[in-house]
Amino acid sequence: MAVPVPDVRVLISYSHDGDGHRKAVLNLANRLRHAGIDAWIDQFEEHEPPESWPDWMRRELTKADFVLVVVTEVYVERFNRDSAEGVGSGVRWEGALITAGLYHGRQDKARYLPVVLREEDRRLIPVPLNLTTSYVVGETGDGDLAPLLRVLRGSPGAVPVALGSLPEAAARDWQIDLYLGNAREIWKRLDHDLRLALAQDWIIANSGHPEVRGHDRDELANALAEERPRHALSELLLEGRVEVLRGHYAAVNPSSWGPTGNPRRIGLDHAIVEMASSDGGSPSPERSLLMRRVGREWFVANFRAAYVIPGWPPRQEEIPGTLSDRGM
Protein backbone atom coordinates (compact mmCIF):
# COMPACT_ATOMS: atom_id res chain seq x y z
CA MET A 1 0.00 0.00 0.00
CA ALA A 2 1.55 3.30 -1.12
CA VAL A 3 1.86 6.05 1.46
CA PRO A 4 0.00 9.18 0.19
CA VAL A 5 2.22 12.19 -0.62
CA PRO A 6 1.23 15.86 -1.11
CA ASP A 7 0.94 17.22 -4.69
CA VAL A 8 4.33 18.22 -6.08
CA ARG A 9 4.54 20.72 -8.94
CA VAL A 10 7.52 20.22 -11.27
CA LEU A 11 8.56 22.36 -14.23
CA ILE A 12 10.80 20.77 -16.85
CA SER A 13 13.29 23.15 -18.48
CA TYR A 14 14.81 21.95 -21.78
CA SER A 15 16.08 23.09 -25.15
CA HIS A 16 14.24 22.34 -28.39
CA ASP A 17 17.02 20.23 -29.91
CA GLY A 18 14.72 18.47 -32.37
CA ASP A 19 11.59 16.35 -32.62
CA GLY A 20 13.28 13.33 -31.00
CA HIS A 21 14.34 15.37 -27.98
CA ARG A 22 10.91 16.98 -27.65
CA LYS A 23 9.35 13.51 -27.61
CA ALA A 24 11.83 12.31 -24.98
CA VAL A 25 10.97 15.27 -22.74
CA LEU A 26 7.25 14.72 -23.26
CA ASN A 27 7.73 11.07 -22.33
CA LEU A 28 9.55 12.10 -19.13
CA ALA A 29 6.77 14.52 -18.19
CA ASN A 30 4.08 11.90 -18.72
CA ARG A 31 6.02 9.22 -16.79
CA LEU A 32 6.28 11.61 -13.84
CA ARG A 33 2.58 12.47 -14.07
CA HIS A 34 1.72 8.76 -14.15
CA ALA A 35 3.75 8.45 -10.91
CA GLY A 36 1.64 11.17 -9.26
CA ILE A 37 3.98 14.13 -9.88
CA ASP A 38 2.38 17.26 -11.41
CA ALA A 39 5.05 17.69 -14.11
CA TRP A 40 4.55 20.53 -16.63
CA ILE A 41 6.21 21.50 -19.91
CA ASP A 42 5.61 24.17 -22.55
CA GLN A 43 4.25 21.53 -24.95
CA PHE A 44 1.11 21.38 -22.82
CA GLU A 45 0.53 25.10 -23.52
CA GLU A 46 1.45 25.35 -27.21
CA HIS A 47 -2.14 24.93 -28.42
CA GLU A 48 -3.01 28.18 -26.57
CA PRO A 49 0.29 30.09 -26.51
CA PRO A 50 0.63 32.80 -23.87
CA GLU A 51 1.02 36.42 -24.90
CA SER A 52 4.56 36.35 -23.51
CA TRP A 53 6.60 33.14 -23.21
CA PRO A 54 9.19 34.86 -20.96
CA ASP A 55 6.43 35.84 -18.52
CA TRP A 56 5.05 32.29 -18.71
CA MET A 57 8.49 30.90 -17.80
CA ARG A 58 8.83 33.29 -14.87
CA ARG A 59 5.38 32.37 -13.51
CA GLU A 60 5.98 28.62 -13.91
CA LEU A 61 9.38 28.85 -12.21
CA THR A 62 7.73 30.63 -9.29
CA LYS A 63 4.93 28.04 -8.97
CA ALA A 64 7.18 24.98 -9.21
CA ASP A 65 8.35 23.08 -6.14
CA PHE A 66 11.16 21.64 -8.27
CA VAL A 67 12.65 22.51 -11.65
CA LEU A 68 14.11 19.64 -13.68
CA VAL A 69 16.81 20.90 -16.06
CA VAL A 70 17.28 18.48 -18.97
CA VAL A 71 20.93 18.99 -19.89
CA THR A 72 22.20 18.46 -23.45
CA GLU A 73 25.02 20.08 -25.44
CA VAL A 74 22.52 22.49 -27.00
CA TYR A 75 21.01 23.37 -23.60
CA VAL A 76 24.45 24.11 -22.11
CA GLU A 77 25.41 26.30 -25.08
CA ARG A 78 22.28 28.38 -24.67
CA PHE A 79 22.36 28.32 -20.87
CA ASN A 80 25.89 29.75 -20.97
CA ARG A 81 24.86 32.32 -23.64
CA ASP A 82 27.33 30.91 -26.16
CA SER A 83 24.77 30.58 -28.97
CA ALA A 84 24.23 33.17 -31.67
CA GLU A 85 22.10 36.19 -30.81
CA GLY A 86 18.41 35.36 -31.07
CA VAL A 87 19.00 31.59 -31.11
CA GLY A 88 17.59 29.67 -28.16
CA SER A 89 16.42 32.84 -26.43
CA GLY A 90 13.96 30.84 -24.28
CA VAL A 91 16.71 28.81 -22.62
CA ARG A 92 18.94 31.92 -22.34
CA TRP A 93 16.17 33.74 -20.44
CA GLU A 94 15.25 30.69 -18.38
CA GLY A 95 18.93 30.07 -17.62
CA ALA A 96 19.26 33.61 -16.30
CA LEU A 97 16.25 33.11 -14.01
CA ILE A 98 17.57 29.73 -12.77
CA THR A 99 21.03 31.18 -12.12
CA ALA A 100 19.49 34.06 -10.17
CA GLY A 101 17.34 31.60 -8.21
CA LEU A 102 20.38 29.54 -7.31
CA TYR A 103 22.38 32.62 -6.31
CA HIS A 104 19.70 34.23 -4.18
CA GLY A 105 18.09 31.02 -2.87
CA ARG A 106 17.98 30.38 0.85
CA GLN A 107 16.83 26.75 0.77
CA ASP A 108 18.49 23.85 2.53
CA LYS A 109 17.50 21.39 -0.22
CA ALA A 110 18.05 21.52 -3.97
CA ARG A 111 15.17 22.94 -6.01
CA TYR A 112 16.85 22.91 -9.42
CA LEU A 113 17.66 19.30 -10.30
CA PRO A 114 19.82 18.48 -13.35
CA VAL A 115 18.69 15.43 -15.34
CA VAL A 116 20.25 13.82 -18.41
CA LEU A 117 18.91 11.28 -20.87
CA ARG A 118 22.20 9.36 -21.02
CA GLU A 119 24.87 8.60 -18.43
CA GLU A 120 27.64 10.08 -20.59
CA ASP A 121 25.87 13.47 -20.64
CA ARG A 122 26.54 14.04 -16.95
CA ARG A 123 29.85 15.66 -17.95
CA LEU A 124 27.87 18.43 -19.68
CA ILE A 125 26.10 19.68 -16.56
CA PRO A 126 27.19 23.30 -16.11
CA VAL A 127 28.17 25.16 -12.98
CA PRO A 128 26.30 25.85 -10.71
CA LEU A 129 23.91 22.98 -11.52
CA ASN A 130 26.66 20.36 -11.09
CA LEU A 131 26.96 21.10 -7.38
CA THR A 132 24.01 18.85 -6.52
CA THR A 133 22.92 15.31 -7.42
CA SER A 134 22.05 14.60 -11.04
CA TYR A 135 19.74 11.91 -12.43
CA VAL A 136 19.75 9.73 -15.56
CA VAL A 137 16.16 9.32 -16.81
CA GLY A 138 16.66 7.49 -20.12
CA GLU A 139 15.76 8.39 -23.69
CA THR A 140 12.91 5.97 -24.41
CA GLY A 141 11.09 5.45 -21.10
CA ASP A 142 13.35 2.69 -19.83
CA GLY A 143 15.33 4.78 -17.35
CA ASP A 144 14.98 4.18 -13.63
CA LEU A 145 13.02 7.10 -12.14
CA ALA A 146 13.10 5.73 -8.58
CA PRO A 147 16.02 7.92 -7.31
CA LEU A 148 14.43 11.05 -8.79
CA LEU A 149 10.96 10.16 -7.48
CA ARG A 150 12.36 9.70 -3.96
CA VAL A 151 13.61 13.30 -4.05
CA LEU A 152 10.42 14.74 -5.54
CA ARG A 153 8.26 12.89 -3.01
CA GLY A 154 10.61 13.42 -0.07
CA SER A 155 10.63 9.66 0.46
CA PRO A 156 13.90 8.30 1.90
CA GLY A 157 15.58 5.33 0.25
CA ALA A 158 17.46 4.63 3.45
CA VAL A 159 16.68 5.60 7.04
CA PRO A 160 19.28 5.45 9.82
CA VAL A 161 18.74 2.80 12.47
CA ALA A 162 17.60 4.32 15.74
CA LEU A 163 20.06 4.67 18.56
CA GLY A 164 19.03 3.05 21.80
CA SER A 165 18.49 -0.34 23.36
CA LEU A 166 18.50 -3.48 21.23
CA PRO A 167 14.72 -4.09 21.22
CA GLU A 168 14.13 -0.52 20.00
CA ALA A 169 16.77 -0.77 17.30
CA ALA A 170 15.36 -4.09 16.06
CA ALA A 171 11.83 -2.65 16.04
CA ARG A 172 13.09 0.37 14.11
CA ASP A 173 14.85 -1.81 11.51
CA TRP A 174 11.66 -3.83 11.00
CA GLN A 175 9.60 -0.64 10.69
CA ILE A 176 11.94 0.70 7.98
CA ASP A 177 11.80 -2.55 6.01
CA LEU A 178 8.00 -2.50 6.25
CA TYR A 179 7.83 1.09 5.02
CA LEU A 180 10.12 0.30 2.07
CA GLY A 181 8.21 -2.89 1.23
CA ASN A 182 11.14 -5.30 1.60
CA ALA A 183 8.94 -8.39 1.95
CA ARG A 184 11.64 -10.97 2.62
CA GLU A 185 13.47 -8.73 5.10
CA ILE A 186 10.15 -8.07 6.87
CA TRP A 187 9.55 -11.83 7.14
CA LYS A 188 13.12 -12.58 8.26
CA ARG A 189 12.85 -10.13 11.19
CA LEU A 190 9.80 -11.94 12.61
CA ASP A 191 10.21 -14.47 15.42
CA HIS A 192 9.86 -18.10 14.28
CA ASP A 193 6.68 -18.72 16.31
CA LEU A 194 5.05 -15.68 14.74
CA ARG A 195 6.07 -16.77 11.24
CA LEU A 196 4.69 -20.26 11.93
CA ALA A 197 1.40 -18.90 13.28
CA LEU A 198 1.01 -16.56 10.28
CA ALA A 199 1.71 -19.46 7.92
CA GLN A 200 -0.82 -21.68 9.72
CA ASP A 201 -3.45 -18.94 9.63
CA TRP A 202 -2.81 -18.44 5.89
CA ILE A 203 -3.11 -22.19 5.21
CA ILE A 204 -6.42 -22.34 7.09
CA ALA A 205 -7.75 -19.34 5.14
CA ASN A 206 -6.73 -20.96 1.83
CA SER A 207 -7.41 -24.59 2.71
CA GLY A 208 -9.82 -24.99 -0.20
CA HIS A 209 -7.28 -23.97 -2.82
CA PRO A 210 -5.98 -26.99 -4.80
CA GLU A 211 -2.33 -25.94 -4.46
CA VAL A 212 -2.71 -25.78 -0.67
CA ARG A 213 -4.94 -28.83 -0.34
CA GLY A 214 -2.34 -31.03 -1.99
CA HIS A 215 0.23 -30.58 0.82
CA ASP A 216 0.52 -31.95 4.35
CA ARG A 217 -0.39 -28.86 6.35
CA ASP A 218 2.29 -29.29 9.03
CA GLU A 219 5.03 -29.79 6.48
CA LEU A 220 3.75 -26.83 4.46
CA ALA A 221 3.51 -24.56 7.51
CA ASN A 222 7.06 -25.40 8.61
CA ALA A 223 8.40 -24.81 5.09
CA LEU A 224 6.65 -21.44 4.82
CA ALA A 225 7.79 -20.42 8.32
CA GLU A 226 11.47 -20.65 7.43
CA GLU A 227 13.51 -17.47 7.78
CA ARG A 228 14.08 -17.48 4.01
CA PRO A 229 11.26 -19.65 2.63
CA ARG A 230 11.91 -21.27 -0.75
CA HIS A 231 8.60 -23.10 -1.11
CA ALA A 232 6.65 -22.43 -4.30
CA LEU A 233 3.78 -20.90 -2.28
CA SER A 234 6.00 -18.57 -0.25
CA GLU A 235 5.58 -15.58 -2.58
CA LEU A 236 1.78 -15.76 -2.29
CA LEU A 237 2.03 -15.98 1.50
CA LEU A 238 4.50 -13.08 1.78
CA GLU A 239 2.56 -10.89 -0.62
CA GLY A 240 -0.69 -11.32 1.30
CA ARG A 241 0.73 -10.97 4.81
CA VAL A 242 2.99 -8.02 4.00
CA GLU A 243 0.14 -6.16 2.27
CA VAL A 244 -2.01 -6.50 5.41
CA LEU A 245 0.84 -5.25 7.61
CA ARG A 246 1.62 -2.32 5.35
CA GLY A 247 -2.03 -1.36 5.38
CA HIS A 248 -2.10 -1.38 9.18
CA TYR A 249 1.15 0.61 9.47
CA ALA A 250 0.61 2.82 6.39
CA ALA A 251 0.67 6.04 8.44
CA VAL A 252 3.78 5.04 10.38
CA ASN A 253 6.44 6.84 8.31
CA PRO A 254 9.94 6.23 9.77
CA SER A 255 10.73 9.92 9.33
CA SER A 256 7.92 10.92 11.71
CA TRP A 257 7.14 7.77 13.74
CA GLY A 258 9.33 5.46 15.75
CA PRO A 259 9.97 3.64 19.03
CA THR A 260 9.49 5.83 22.08
CA GLY A 261 10.90 5.66 25.58
CA ASN A 262 12.44 2.55 27.06
CA PRO A 263 10.99 -0.82 26.07
CA ARG A 264 8.89 -2.47 28.75
CA ARG A 265 10.70 -5.69 29.67
CA ILE A 266 8.64 -8.87 30.08
CA GLY A 267 10.87 -11.43 31.74
CA LEU A 268 14.34 -12.01 30.33
CA ASP A 269 13.56 -12.48 26.66
CA HIS A 270 10.56 -10.30 25.82
CA ALA A 271 9.99 -6.54 25.62
CA ILE A 272 7.16 -4.28 24.44
CA VAL A 273 8.17 -1.41 22.18
CA GLU A 274 5.60 1.35 21.68
CA MET A 275 5.45 3.66 18.65
CA ALA A 276 4.81 7.40 18.80
CA SER A 277 5.09 10.38 16.46
CA SER A 278 8.25 12.46 16.64
CA ASP A 279 6.27 15.62 17.46
CA GLY A 280 5.78 14.42 21.02
CA GLY A 281 2.43 12.69 20.53
CA SER A 282 1.17 9.92 22.76
CA PRO A 283 2.24 6.32 22.06
CA SER A 284 -0.06 4.30 19.82
CA PRO A 285 -0.90 1.03 21.68
CA GLU A 286 -2.50 -0.54 18.59
CA ARG A 287 0.88 -0.31 16.83
CA SER A 288 2.99 -1.64 19.70
CA LEU A 289 5.40 -4.46 18.96
CA LEU A 290 6.21 -7.43 21.19
CA MET A 291 9.90 -8.20 20.74
CA ARG A 292 11.62 -11.49 21.61
CA ARG A 293 15.32 -12.09 22.11
CA VAL A 294 16.76 -15.23 20.53
CA GLY A 295 20.45 -15.55 21.30
CA ARG A 296 21.91 -12.11 20.79
CA GLU A 297 19.25 -10.81 18.38
CA TRP A 298 15.76 -9.35 18.84
CA PHE A 299 12.84 -10.29 16.59
CA VAL A 300 9.25 -9.08 16.26
CA ALA A 301 7.19 -11.63 18.23
CA ASN A 302 3.75 -10.05 17.73
CA PHE A 303 2.01 -6.87 16.67
CA ARG A 304 0.40 -6.43 20.08
CA ALA A 305 1.19 -7.31 23.71
CA ALA A 306 0.27 -10.98 23.54
CA TYR A 307 2.24 -14.21 23.19
CA VAL A 308 1.67 -16.10 19.93
CA ILE A 309 0.98 -19.82 20.26
CA PRO A 310 1.15 -21.72 16.94
CA GLY A 311 -1.48 -24.37 16.31
CA TRP A 312 -4.54 -25.31 14.27
CA PRO A 313 -5.77 -22.65 14.71
CA PRO A 314 -2.99 -20.48 16.18
CA ARG A 315 -3.99 -18.42 19.18
CA GLN A 316 -2.74 -15.57 21.35
CA GLU A 317 -2.30 -15.29 25.09
CA GLU A 318 -2.64 -11.84 26.62
CA ILE A 319 0.31 -10.65 28.70
CA PRO A 320 -0.93 -9.61 32.18
CA GLY A 321 -0.51 -5.95 33.04
CA THR A 322 -0.19 -4.72 29.46
CA LEU A 323 -2.65 -3.79 26.70
CA SER A 324 -5.43 -6.08 27.90
CA ASP A 325 -5.64 -4.05 31.09
CA ARG A 326 -6.17 -0.90 29.02
CA GLY A 327 -9.35 -2.21 27.50
CA MET A 328 -7.65 -3.25 24.22
Image (cartoon, grey):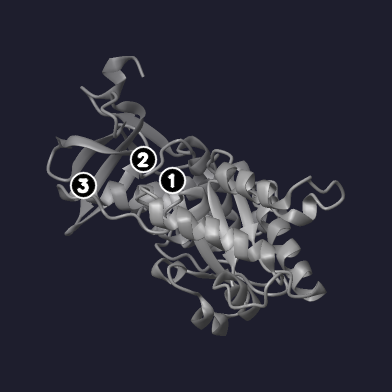
Distance in Å between CA atoms under marks 3 and 2 = 21 Å
Dot 3: element: helix
Mark 2 / mark 1, whichever is N-terminal: 1
Camera-nearest residue between 196 and 255: 255
Quarter placement of the N terminus: top right
Q: Position of residue 25 (x, y in %)?
A: 71, 65
- On the image, numbered disc 2 is attached to which residue? 309
Q: Is residue 14 above or below residue 319?
A: below
- On the image, numbered disc 3 is attached to which residue? 167
Q: Amino acid at mark 3?
A: Pro
- On the image, numbered disc 1 is attached to which residue? 197
Dot 1: element: helix
Distance in Å between CA atoms under marks 3 and 1 = 21 Å
Mark 3 / mark 2, whichever is N-terminal: 3
Q: Amino acid at mark 2?
A: Ile
Of tags 3 and 2, which is closer to the observer? Answer: 3
The residue depicted at 26 percent of the width and 51 percent of the height is 170
Quarter placement of the C terminus: top left
Q: Amino acid at mark 1?
A: Ala
Q: Position of residue 242 (x, y in %)?
A: 51, 48
Crowding around mark 2 (Cα neighbors within 10 Å: few <14, some 14 to 19, many 20+) is: some
Report the label total.
Answer: 3
> Do labels 2 and 1 touch, CB within 8 Å?
yes
Dot 2: element: strand
8 displayed left or right of 196: right
